[in-house]
DNA sequence: ACGGAACCGTACCGTACGGTACATAAGTTT
DNA sequence: AAACTTATGTACCGTACGGTACGGTTCCGT
């Protein structure tokens, strides 16, 4: 929806910083007011209540990421494969980002309140754009004859599983991403290679 | 390692019930004492403090699940395939269980405290047994020539990704498991089928 | 220059929760 | 039976936090 004022954006950025640094318990209205040099009254005027603030943080963070529109005309199989690898690397990068992890932890921790409103918000603003970008990419590949599948959703979820495994939950549980960030590129290439063996036209290997 | 007394088990069971019903905020020391007909002082005597109680809940829950030891001698490929499908169904069943979801939400919500002590506990008591069961199964399959892979960990993580996709995080975020529980069996079979196409006999090992 | 809106800083209130203390009862040991 | 252990229930304390109120200040439009 309509974005926030620059001042509010700065406050939200500060709130994200607090959340990343100290988790949810460090994100108090008084603490945020102190850190952002604003008054608690302004916080309640702008965001309604604490839940409104949390929701605003999610939409603000979502507004920062730009989803690269799929440029059409991707003639060669090599280009298409590279695009998938880039998607995989981007996905791993996003999921292991500090802010993403903190917001996911926040929403998961509140999944029992308000019918998981924050969770729904996170799915809508965080996961859905990624999913749609990937699905467009997959269908482009199918249109060019590089892939073959009947159910786009099934193909996408398989791709997601091959890329992420259970790394997301492990990171959410606090496991240090040792080796995860390191071998990210290699892991992305392996996942795409496996994906082609399941949904590709031929058994194209990567490099 | 030593278990708790029956009385303490009953209290922990009651605590899990509270957690499942109302999330972390519903699990207060006073509320648990009232629900379990015990005194707060006993809670602190038995579990030290609130974090000790949470940790005890995890270990207690872990003590309830029995991991079926892999019975050896699995001659036919069909038996082995069926075992993998059963594992996949079990995994999906465990991950979508109410208590499992509640405990994972709890540990994820506390991932920023004490160096993610609860998260480590959950990985050790919850995920590791499952992983070792699966890895033993995979290596058994390799020993019989049904599978071929060089890195057991890589094979296991691929299997996990093919089975679970991002369903775990989605459920943690509060997405209703509509269609998840329904098509669980079908999904398990598809995942195992895909896994065989990647790691089954005759499939080429990738780098 | 004037008036009003927005905002800051702070003080304040109510409450909820973690943790402790204590009085009492029930069972166990000697 | 007396002493001890263990547990219950209740009352209490300190604190931290969400939310509100208010006086003072800055800024903008007219």
Image (spheres, coloured by chain):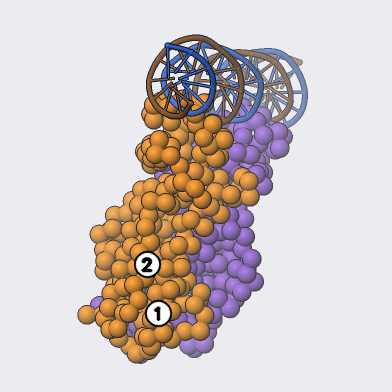
Chain colours: A orange, B purple, C blue, D brown
Disc 2 is attached to a residue of which chain?
A
Q: Where A72 sits versus A91, above or below?
A: below
Badge 1 sits on which subunit? A
Q: Nearer the viewer, mark 2 or mark 1?
A: 2
Judging depth in this view, the residue of B198 and A68 nearest the camera is A68
Say left or right for B142 vs A76.
Answer: right
* Residue occupied by mark 2: A69
**Residue at figure coordinates x 28%, y 63% from the top left:** A184
In this image, A205 relative to D25: left or right? left
Residue D3 x, y percent position in the rendering: 64, 16
Please say whether residue B32 is visible from this viewpoint.
yes
Instruction: Give how far apart the Cα atoms at labels 2 and 1 are.
Output: 13 Å
Q: Residue at x 59, y 50 (%)?
A: A116
- Please name whichever residue, B172 or C3, is drawn nearer the observer in this view of the structure: C3
Asked if badges 2 and 1 are on one and the same chain, I answer yes
Looking at the image, which is closer to me, B73 or A16? A16
Does the residue at mark 2 contact the one at mark 1 (Cβ under 8 Å)? no
Mark 2: few/some/many CA within 10 Å (<14, 14-19, 20+): few
Q: Picture quarter containing residue B128?
A: bottom left
Q: Is residue A80 above or below residue A53?
A: below
Q: Position of residue A30 (x, y in %)?
A: 47, 26
Question: Which label sits on residue A140?
Answer: 1
Does residue B4 appear in the picture of this structure?
A: no
Sooner in the amino-acid sequence: mark 2 or mark 1: 2
């Amino acid at each position: 929806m309509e974005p926030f004022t620059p001042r509010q954006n700065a406050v939200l950025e500060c709130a994200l910083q607090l959340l990343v640094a100290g988790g949810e318990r460090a994100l108090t209205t008084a603490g945020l007011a102190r850190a952002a040099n604003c008054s608690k009254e302004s916080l309640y005027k702008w965001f309604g209540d604490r839940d409104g603030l949390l929701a605003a943080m999610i939409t603000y963070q979502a507004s920062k990421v730009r989803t690269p529109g799929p440029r059409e005309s991707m003639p060669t199989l090599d280009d298409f494969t590279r695009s998938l690898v880039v998607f995989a690397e981007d996905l791993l990068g996003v999921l292991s980002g500090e802010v993403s992890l903190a917001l996911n932890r926040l929403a998961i921790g509140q999944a029992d309140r308000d019918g998981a409103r924050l969770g729904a918000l996170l799915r809508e603003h965080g996961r859905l754009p990624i999913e749609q970008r990937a699905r467009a990419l997959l269908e482009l590949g199918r249109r060019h004859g590089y892939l073959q599948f009947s159910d786009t959703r099934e193909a996408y979820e398989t791709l997601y599983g091959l890329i992420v495994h259970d790394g997301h939950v492990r990171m959410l549980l606090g496991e240090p991403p040792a080796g995860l960030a390191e071998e990210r590129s290699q892991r992305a290439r392996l996942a795409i290679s496996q994906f082609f063996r399941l949904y590709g036209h031929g058994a194209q290997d990567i490099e």
